[in-house]
Image: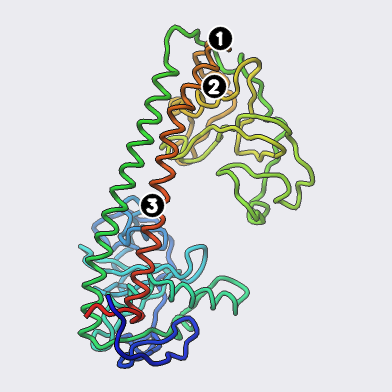
């Protein structure tokens, strides 16, 4: 790909020069009608015969709607908020502010929620595909961040989105750009999907190896309460306000000393095993339930704290990380692993010398797998960065695809 023959200043700091025959237009001038907010209705219905009620939580990272979050509205309520092919939704507040979704190739009727803003690109001026790709560029991210610098809260309303300035090439070029990016991003996405599948296979291999080496039935069965000590009585509960003041998240359930104003000193100094007490991963096993916390730290009331009475702590961590807790978990909406249930799980405990040999074997094999996983995850991040960079170069005219 080569640059265009001639450029001109866009007079926009984060955009720079654009091809001489391109224009810069504000979003409000390339859409039909006005930017519109969605319905302020609670998501209660799940009737698939009714219009789907699209919310920010429905946006998948793959640009598609999640299937497991389906909600609907009655036809009467949805009527004023129906979406048309090519409409683009902008998130206006919260952690996902600025995130976009293109309503395209949807089989059925849908409407959208109040924390979203709808833009309907005028196909005589700007193609929906081109505008949507622009919102996936780092130029769009720079614009979004500039809004946050000017405001005290992360909120972008219709008034601000109206002022979003886009580089606009002639319609035939917009078509060529969209087709080029469709092809290239599909190739990148395929590579990413292949690597993510490989990660899943490697994680399965890792878990299978650990489970196999830990499942020797010659080891005696013992209830957990007889082989570890519990320290749950010194946990510090956190209010939602205090959790909001976190400046760092080291663990999914746990914090480190000093990052919440209320905690002036650490509670633990040493090496302990932390086990998640609640959360969806108790059932789905998407993340490790158990791991070792070492050094000076405190723990909130969403984790069990244990330490082996006599044994290799690394062995117990491997054992408890890979244990299937599903039959010991209570509740489905709010899964919970109570202390009583945890104390009464039965585990196989070999002699200390055998524990240490098992740990050595696990670390040798899993170390190699973990190194491979780290390399693949780095490759995925590089592909994602390349994807954004490619989109940015093309939609801003830094390179020509025509």
Determine the image quadrant of residue 187: bottom left
Tell me the residue that label 3 is attached to: 379
Q: Nearer the viewer, mark 2 or mark 3?
A: 3
Secondary structure at numbered mark 3: helix
Q: Nearer the viewer, mark 3 or mark 1?
A: 3
Whether residue 32 sits left or right of residue 164 in the image: it is left
Local crowd size for mark 2, using a 10 Å CA cut-off: few (<14), some (14–19), many (≥20): many
What residue is drawn where x is 27% and y is 61%? Answer: 50
Residue 110 point in image, percent of width and height: 28, 66
Q: Earlier in the sequence, mark 2 or mark 3?
A: 2
Residue 188 point in image, percent of width and height: 29, 59
Check if mark 1's residue and mark 2's residue have beta carbons within 8 Å: no
Determine the image quadrant of residue 204: top left
Tell me the residue that label 2 is attached to: 315
Whether residue 14 sits left or right of residue 130 in the image: it is right
Local crowd size for mark 1, using a 10 Å CA cut-off: few (<14), some (14–19), many (≥20): few
Q: Nearer the viewer, residue 230 or 73?
A: 230
- Taking 109 as reference, is 350 above or below it? above
What residue is drawn where x is 66% and y is 24%? Answer: 230
Whether residue 218 sits left or right of residue 2 in the image: it is right
Q: Earlier in the sequence, mark 3 or mark 1?
A: 1
Q: Earlier in the sequence, mark 1 or mark 2?
A: 2
Secondary structure at numbered mark 2: helix
- Taking 201 as reference, is 175 above or below it? below
What residue is drawn where x is 36% and y is 85%? Answer: 167
The numbered dot on residue 351 is 1
């Amino acid at each position: 790909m080569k640059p265009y023959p001639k450029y001109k200043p866009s007079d926009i700091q984060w955009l720079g020069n654009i091809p001489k025959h391109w224009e810069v237009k504000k979003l409000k001038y390339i859409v039909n009608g006005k930017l519109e907010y969605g319905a302020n209705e609670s998501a209660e219905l799940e009737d698939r015969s009714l219009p789907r009620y699209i919310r920010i939580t429905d946006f998948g990272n793959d640009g598609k709607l999640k299937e497991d979050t389906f909600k609907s509205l009655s036809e009467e309520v949805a009527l004023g908020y129906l979406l048309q092919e090519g409409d683009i939704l902008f998130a206006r507040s919260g952690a996902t502010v600025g995130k976009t979704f293109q309503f395209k190739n949807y089989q059925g009727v849908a409407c959208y929620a109040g924390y979203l803003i709808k833009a309907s690109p005028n196909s005589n001026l700007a193609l929906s595909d081109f505008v949507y790709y622009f919102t996936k560029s780092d130029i769009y991210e720079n614009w979004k961040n500039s809004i946050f610098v000017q405001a005290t809260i992360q909120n972008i309303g219709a008034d601000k989105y109206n002022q979003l300035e886009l580089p606009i090439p002639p319609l035939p070029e917009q078509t060529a750009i969209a087709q080029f990016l469709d092809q290239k991003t599909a190739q990148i996405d395929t590579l990413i999907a292949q690597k993510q599948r490989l990660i899943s296979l490697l994680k399965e291999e890792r878990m299978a190896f650990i489970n196999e080496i830990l499942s020797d039935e010659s080891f005696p069965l013992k209830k957990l309460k007889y082989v570890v000590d519990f320290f749950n009585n010194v946990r510090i509960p956190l209010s939602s306000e205090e959790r909001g003041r976190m400046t760092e998240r080291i663990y999914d359930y746990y914090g480190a000393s000093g990052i919440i104003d209320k905690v002036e000193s650490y509670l633990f100094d040493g090496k302990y095993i932390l086990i998640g007490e609640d959360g969806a991963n108790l059932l789905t096993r998407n993340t490790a339930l158990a791991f070792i916390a070492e050094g000076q730290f405190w723990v909130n009331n969403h984790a069990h704290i244990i330490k082996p009475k006599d044994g290799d702590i690394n062995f117990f961590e491997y054992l408890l990380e890979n244990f299937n807790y599903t039959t010991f978990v209570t509740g489905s909406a709010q899964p919970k692993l109570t202390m009583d249930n945890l104390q009464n799980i039965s585990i196989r405990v070999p002699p200390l010398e055998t524990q240490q040999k098992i740990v050595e074997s696990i670390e040798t094999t899993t170390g190699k797998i973990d190194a491979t996983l780290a390399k693949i995850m780095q490759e995925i991040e590089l592909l994602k960065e390349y994807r954004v960079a490619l989109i940015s170069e093309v939609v801003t005219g830094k390179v020509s695809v025509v």
